[in-house]
């Protein structure tokens, strides 16, 4: 990266960071602390992962169904699968965007929490808050590991989906359907693994949300 590019990148990063700071400051004035925003974004990520899990499973079913049904316009089959692919890509994008949004507010929360430790007059309360911060960081790390692991499983499956849709687009014949059938069967194990990871991540998110809620 040349010096000019580095300066542009640094400027863009600072601008985005500044925008986030302004946003969080405005939200706090409206009564929404960073902790509340973090919980809300984790909930949104849960929903995004649930929708992605269901969409990937549905798309695989459509791929298998199209490959097994004899007759019908091959062009219509291509269009049907292309629509399914686009839905999958949209769901995957939403998951990645939600993970990035969580990361942004978590970084701001942890920075604020750490910086405010010096404001305690009581050593006991400071130590308790510091331990809570450390525990929350650990739980957050576990959550992010689960979410990113599940999200990482999506791209290889999307690559295969794209290849098959592209192959069908330019080879509207029985050979393309046979390839689609074989590939779809092979993908079943990958989709099953994706679903398992998504469900694990969703459970991690649920646990994290409970721990972040104020005690009754």
Image: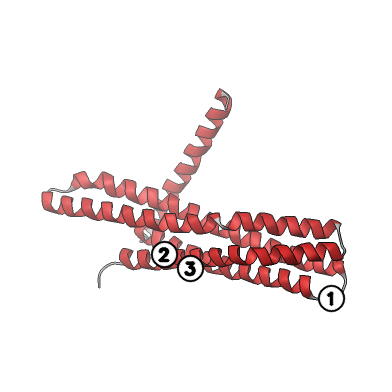
User: Mark number for residue 205?
Assistant: 2
Question: x and y percent of residue 212 in the render?
Answer: 32, 63
Cα distance between the residues tagged 1 and 2: 43 Å
Question: x and y percent of residue 73 in the render?
Answer: 88, 71
Callout 1 secondary element:
loop
Q: Specify few, some or many for label 1: CA neighbours under 10 Å numbering under 14, 14-19, or 20 or more.
A: few
**To which quarter of the image does residue 65 belong?**
bottom right
**To which quarter of the image does residue 171 belong?**
bottom right
Residue drawn at x 56%, y 57% as measured from the top left: 153
Cα distance between the residues tagged 3 and 1: 35 Å
User: Which one is earlier in the sequence, the residue at label 2 or at label 3?
Assistant: 3
Residue 25 at least partly seen: no
Question: x and y percent of residue 45 in the render?
Answer: 49, 62
Q: Which residue is mark 3?
A: 199
Question: x and y percent of residue 22 in the render?
Answer: 43, 48
Q: Where, quadrant-wise, is the N terminus in this rendering?
A: top right
Residues at circles 3 and 1 in contact by the CB criterion of under 8 Å: no
Callout 3 secondary element:
helix
Residue in front for this viewpoint, 164 or 109: 164
Q: Which residue is mark 1?
A: 70
Q: Where, quadrant-wise, is the C terminus in this rendering?
A: bottom left
Q: Is residue 20 left or right of residue 66?
A: left
User: Which one is earlier in the sequence, the residue at label 1 or at label 2?
Assistant: 1
The number of callouts visible is 3
Residue drawn at x 33%, y 49% as measured from the top left: 110
């Amino acid at each position: 990266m040349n010096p000019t590019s580095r300066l542009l990148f640094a400027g863009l990063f600072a601008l985005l960071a500044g925008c986030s700071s302004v946003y969080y400051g405005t939200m706090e004035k409206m009564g929404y602390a960073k902790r509340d925003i973090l919980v809300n974004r984790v909930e949104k990520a849960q929903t995004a992962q649930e929708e992605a899990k269901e969409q990937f499973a549905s798309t695989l079913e459509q791929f298998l169904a199209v490959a097994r049904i004899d007759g019908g316009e091959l062009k219509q089959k291509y269009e049907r699968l292309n629509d399914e692919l686009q839905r999958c890509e949209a769901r995957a994008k939403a998951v990645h965007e939600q993970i990035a949004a969580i990361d942004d507010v978590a970084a701001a929360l942890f920075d604020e929490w750490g910086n405010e430790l010096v404001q305690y007059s009581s050593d006991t309360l400071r130590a308790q808050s510091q331990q809570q911060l450390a525990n929350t960081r650990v739980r957050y790390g576990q959550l992010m590991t689960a979410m990113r692991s599940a999200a990482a499983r999506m791209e290889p499956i999307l690559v295969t989906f794209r290849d098959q849709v592209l192959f069908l687009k330019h080879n509207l014949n029985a050979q393309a359907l046979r390839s689609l059938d074989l590939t779809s069967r092979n993908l079943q194990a990958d989709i099953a693994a994706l679903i398992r990871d998504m469900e694990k991540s969703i459970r991690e998110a649920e646990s994290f949300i409970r721990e972040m809620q104020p005690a009754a």
